[in-house]
Image (cartoon, grey):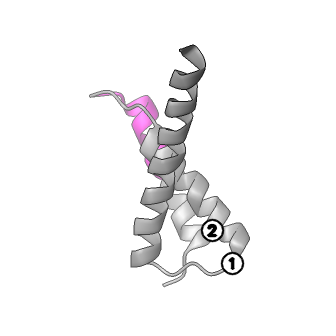
Amino acid sequence: MEIERFLLSLLSTVLSGFLLERVVECLLECRSCPKKILLLFGCWLQANMVIYFQDWINFIPTIFAFLICVLVACEG
């Protein structure tokens, strides 16, 4: 029971990051494989970070890291 819950949680975090990465790739151009991996990491971080209301300690660095990943990985 516990292993199924862990695998489902792992699958959902990877899937949400991948889907957000696909959305960003539809809007911005990203060609090389290492840059796509960086973009996938940034999207995974953004999609799976738990941010509570008025929690500026987590919110600002997460948005900043996501924007840096998009800036480095995408062209245009």
Q: Secondary structure at mark 1?
A: loop
For image coordinates 50% across by 32% down, the residue present is: 8
For image coordinates 53% across by 40% down, the residue present is: 11
Residue 28 in sight here: yes
The magenta segment is 54-64
Frontmost residue, 8 versus 31: 8
Identify the disc placed on residue 32: 1
Frontmost residue, 60 versus 2: 2
- Residue 12 spot, x, y in % from top left: 47, 40
The residue pinned by badge 2 equals 36
Frontmost residue, 13 versus 55: 13
Which residue in the rendered view is the most extreme toward the top? 1
For image coordinates 45% across by 78% down, the residue present is: 28
Q: Dot 2: few (<14), some (14–19), or many (≥20) neighbours within 10 Å?
A: some
- Left or right for 10, reference 55: right
* Quadrant of residue 40 within the rendered picture: bottom right
Frontmost residue, 30 versus 57: 30
- Left or right for 54, reference 2: left
